[in-house]
Image (cartoon, rainbow, N blue to C red):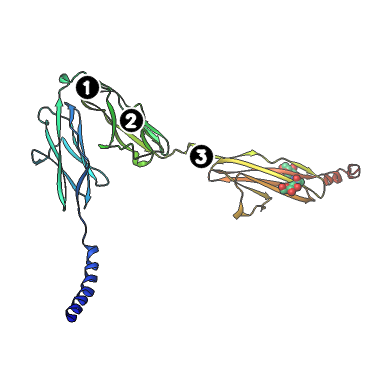
Amino acid sequence: MARGHMIYKAAVQLILPMLLSVLPLTHTQIPPRFTRTPTDQTGVQGGVASFVCQATGDPQPRISWSRKGKKVTNQRFEVIEFDDGSGSVLRVQPLRTPRDEAIYECVASNEAGEISASTRLTVLREDQLPPGFPSIDMGPQLKVVERSRTATMLCAASGTPDPEITWFKDFLPIDTYTHGRIKQLRSGALQIDRSEETDQGKYECVATNSDGTRYSTPANLYVRELRDVRRIPPRFSVPPMDYEVMPGGGVNITCQAVGVPMPYVKWMLGTEDLTPEDDMPIGKNVLELTDVRQSANYTCVAMSTLGVIETVAQITVKGKLIIQTDTDISLHH
Ligand SMILES: *[C@@H]1O[C@H](CO)[C@@H](O)[C@H](O)[C@H]1NC(C)=O
Ligand SMILES: *[C@@H]1O[C@H](CO)[C@@H](O)[C@H](O)[C@H]1NC(C)=O
């Protein structure tokens, strides 16, 4: 009995750690689950229809599209994948009736399982459209926006009942709820704040009501770099003044310059730099003179990548002038 217990104990001591070391390697697989299934659509001949299908699972499920059990392969049928691999869009353009009318199936599969969702496409000729069928009164227009600026793509649609407006970019639906920067206005327009290069693309507005779905003509949005219009060469906003100083007196000479980018400002006396090169103020530099004994011309220099400008402040010591003119005594009274 004791011996059997020992063997059992040894087995547990050996096998349990082995099991534990193997366990993390056995991957738990999760069968596919739809996060978005395609919805039935009624389109117009010559127009567009697109079906959206997304799924999660582990590993990430593959999405495929079929019609009557066969993979869809046709020049007018395009499958566009979401960037994050979460699914795809089946786009049909231009729509043909009656040959495109069918049940389409989205199949999501991974090692753990397979699921499918089906959807119906109906295509009407213009002369068959019910009176309430959506129409696009004003679609988005080609637009160029400077990076970081706001771009608004307009869309106005009518129909009975009032159509709901959604947006597609490069044939993929725009989720305006999860992108704080991109929002749909009450009017239906799409507003893109702080535009980025990734916003560049082809935009379509889509109007849907119970009668059917109508796509606008696509419009391109171009995002370009900020132009250099805001670059301004330096200029003096407060040029230094000339001063007359009593011998041994002091004066502060202010020199101020502006520009885009803001210029550095330094003081020079002749060819001598009075402002340390590695500690040059930007925009404004005050030269403090104390115990002035000699008249001198101080040069204020403003510089940026767009240019260098300079101006002179004349500091005149009164006494010297008076000595020159021999009138120092009278002045000291
Ligand atoms: C110059 O500026 C300094 C510092 O602000 C100040 O202490 C000094 O009195 C000024 N001198 C004159 C002559 O205004
Ligand atoms: C300063 O410049 C003026 C004008 O160029 C000149 O007349 C004057 O002699 C100069 N003063 C000194 C001290 O160099």
Label 1 and label 2: CA atoms lie apart by 26 Å
Q: Secondary structure at mark 1?
A: loop
Name the amino acid type tagged 3: Arg
User: In the current view of this chain or complex, which residue is farthest to the front?
Assistant: 1
Q: Nearer the viewer, mark 3 or mark 1?
A: 1
Question: In the rendering, at what x and y percent does residue 165 appear?
Answer: 29, 29
Q: Amino acid at mark 1?
A: Phe
Disc 1 within 8 angstroms of ligand 1 (CB): no
Q: Is mark 3 within 8 Å of ligand 2?
A: no
Residue 296 visible: no
Estimate the x, y position of residue 285 in percent, counting from the top left.
65, 46
Horizontal side, residue 269 vs residue 115: left or right: right
Residue located at (41% from left, 34% from top): 150
Place residue 182 in its image quadrant. top left
* Quadrant the C terminus occupies: top right
What residue occupies the far bottom of the structure in this picture? 3
Q: Which mark is residue 157?
A: none
**Are the residues tagged 3 and 1 within 8 Å (C-beta)?**
no
- Give neighbour class at mark 2: few <14, some 14-19, many 20+ (Cα, 10 Å): few
Task: Give whichever of discs 3 and 1 has the lower sequence position.
Answer: 1
Residue position marked by numbered label 3 in the rendering: 231
- Say whether marks 3 and 2 touch (CB < 8 Å): no
The image quadrant that residue 14 belongs to is bottom left
Up-down relation of residue 192 to residue 284 (above or below): above
Q: Earlier in the sequence, mark 3 or mark 2?
A: 2
The residue nearer to you, when weighing 96 against 54, is: 54
Labels 1 and 2: the sequence-earlier one: 1
- State if disc 2 and disc 1 touch (CB < 8 Å): no
Mark 1, residue position: 133
